[in-house]
Amino acid sequence: MSGWSETDDSLSEVVPGILHWSGPHPNHGAIVHSHFLTEQRIAVDPIGIDGLVPALEDAGGVEQVLLTNRHHLRGSEEIVEAFGAALRCPRPGLHEFEGPDEPTVIGYGWGEELADGVTAHVVGAIAPDDGALHIAIGAGALAFADAVVADEQGLGFVPDSLMDDPGRTKAGILSSLRGLLGLEFDVLLLAHGPPVPVGGHQVLASFAEAPRTASLG
């Protein structure tokens, strides 16, 4: 599909101000995707890969690590330790980190500006803490957690087996997406799929009109 970026296990530019990398998840081995906002010095859902800390240091260092939902800790702790960065996730997901051996995580709220030009929005439906980040860089970007993923055919829902009530969950996601389409953005950043560097608004609008389920096998 035109506009879709390839996966990459090193930091590469999506658009000026946004870097992308990908790598295998340590628990299930599937390739997952991460992003770095160079001006704000924010790592989003970072997966650990060889040489990541030096690469982020070369890119200016990290002030915050933002999780788009509670399940995306991934390689965050290495980055927090290396840079002394704040680790944050949506407030409804903080219960994931209540144990004595869990990292210190700061909650954030929906509608909160987390850094200059970076605002948290609720998606919900699939989980109360599932969100999206609107990033006012260039033409704008929207970063998703788990509500929207991608395979070789484009955007899709996660499989029904990962939803408690597939019909209600999909309807809730689509309702949230229609609201998010009112934001200004041209770039899509996915935690489970390569970024869409151009035409992302239309790609998301097309999915909202003709939704499908992605193949993640």
Image: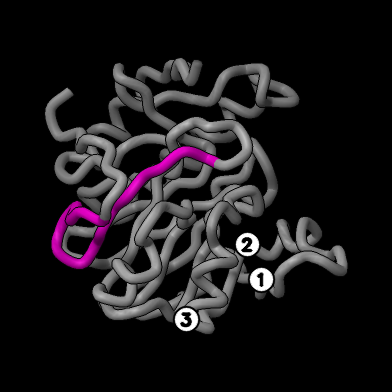
- Are the residues at dot 1 and dot 2 in contact (C-beta closer than 8 Å)? yes
* Residue nearer the viewer, 212 or 34: 34
Q: Of the residues shown, which amino acid type is indicated by label 2?
A: Pro
Q: Of the residues shown, which amino acid type is indicated by label 1?
A: Gly
Label 1, label 3: how many angstroms apart (C-alpha)? 19 Å
**Which residue carries the number 1 mark?**
107
Q: Residue at x 44, y 81 (%)?
A: 63
Can see residue 64? Answer: yes
Assess whether residue 22 is covered by the magenta stretch.
yes
Tag 2 or tag 3, which sits nearer the N-term?
A: 3
Assess whether residue 36 is covered by the magenta stretch.
no
Q: Of the residues shown, which amino acid type is indicated by label 3?
A: Phe
Magenta-highlighted residues:
11-25
Q: Height in image: 108 above or below 177?
A: below
Q: Residue at x 74, y 63 (%)?
A: 94
Q: Secondary structure at mark 2?
A: strand
Relative side of 165 to 216, left or right = right
- Are the residues at dot 1 and dot 3 in contact (C-beta closer than 8 Å)? no
Tag 2 or tag 1, which sits nearer the N-term?
A: 2
Residue 157 position in % (x across, y down): 49, 25
Label 3, label 2: how many angstroms apart (C-alpha)? 21 Å
**Which residue carries the number 3 mark?**
83
- In which quadrant of the rendered image does the N terminus lie? top left
In front: label 3 or label 2: 3
Disc number for residue 90: 2
Relative side of 29 to 197, left or right = right
Can see residue 175? Answer: no
Residue 177 position in % (x across, y down): 44, 40
Label 1, label 2: how many angstroms apart (C-alpha)? 5 Å
* Residue nearer the viewer, 1 or 87: 87
Count of all numbered marks drawn on residues in the image? 3
